[in-house]
Image (cartoon, grey):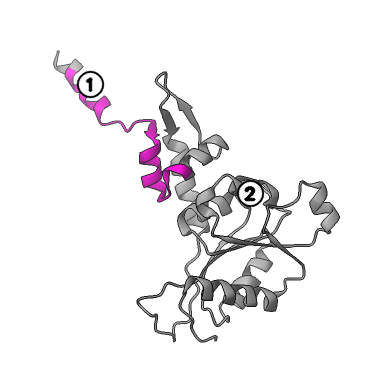
Amino acid sequence: MNKQIAISSDRMNVPKSYVTTFEAAGMLGVTLRTVQLWANRGILESWKTQGGHRRIVRDSVERLLVRRGQQQTPPIVDPGVAPIPSAEALRILVVEDEPDLLRLYRMQLARWPTAPEVSLAGNGFEGLVLIGSVRPHLLIADLHMPEMDGFQMLRTLRAMPQLDAMEIVVVTGLDPSDVAQRGGLPNGTAILPKPIPFSELANIAARIAAQNGCRIGAGN
């Protein structure tokens, strides 16, 4: 009898293999809607109970947490600029699969007068993870990437109305005809050609910062 009680006690201490959408949202630091969309897209593994309640596989949540921890970079700010407490920094997410270009983005954006907080991702999958937590004002994305390309990422974003205020700029080496053949881009998406037009991107960032009342710092 005592042995049976001990076994039952051990089982009670074993973590569940699944979590609710509410628990997953709390673990990932995103909204319930984001978790639901990721489950629908297969980014998170899930199933529904007979009662229609969604359950998320815990391992898939933990894998996202590990991946986000490996990819998210510290904000890029000018240490010589004192922040204004009443204003937030402009948040920018760059999604690009070329490591050299990501380093170039990081270096160039650090010099902008807007002194943005910058996050970097290497493909659309990583971009979606960061979008849910960072909530960028501006998304700068390539289109041709491994795992999940820019087209797939932008199609997923179409189904996330809570991100309608986020401005999207695509920087690509693809011709407009190639983009059109792949299904085009969401309405309102700006498209700029490579090599990366940093001056034009800086002007776009300054406009978005002004529209959102973001703080402005001095460039390096």
Distance between the alpha carbons at the discs numbered 2 and 1: 45 Å
Residue 56: x and y, percent? 44, 33
Question: For this view, does 193 lie left or right of residue 60?
Answer: right
Q: Secondary structure at mark 1?
A: helix
Q: Residue at x 45, y 78 (%)?
A: 215
Res 57 → quadrant: top left
Res 168 → quadrant: bottom right
Q: Is residue 55 above or below residue 76?
A: above
Query: Which one is in front, 66 or 184?
Result: 184
Res 25 → quadrant: top left
Which region shows up in magenta?
A: 5-33
Query: Which one is in front, 146 or 128?
Result: 128
Query: Which one is in front, 40 or 2?
Result: 40
Residue 197: x and y, percent? 72, 74
View extreme (left): residue = 2
Task: Decide whether residue 16 is among the magenta residues.
Answer: yes
Query: Which residue position is annotated with label 1?
Result: 8
Q: Which amino acid type is marked by label 1?
A: Ser
Query: Which residue position is annotated with label 2?
Result: 153
Q: Give the prevailing secondary structure in the magenta stretch.
A: helix
Residue 39: x and y, percent? 51, 36
Q: Residue at x 58, y 75 (%)?
A: 207
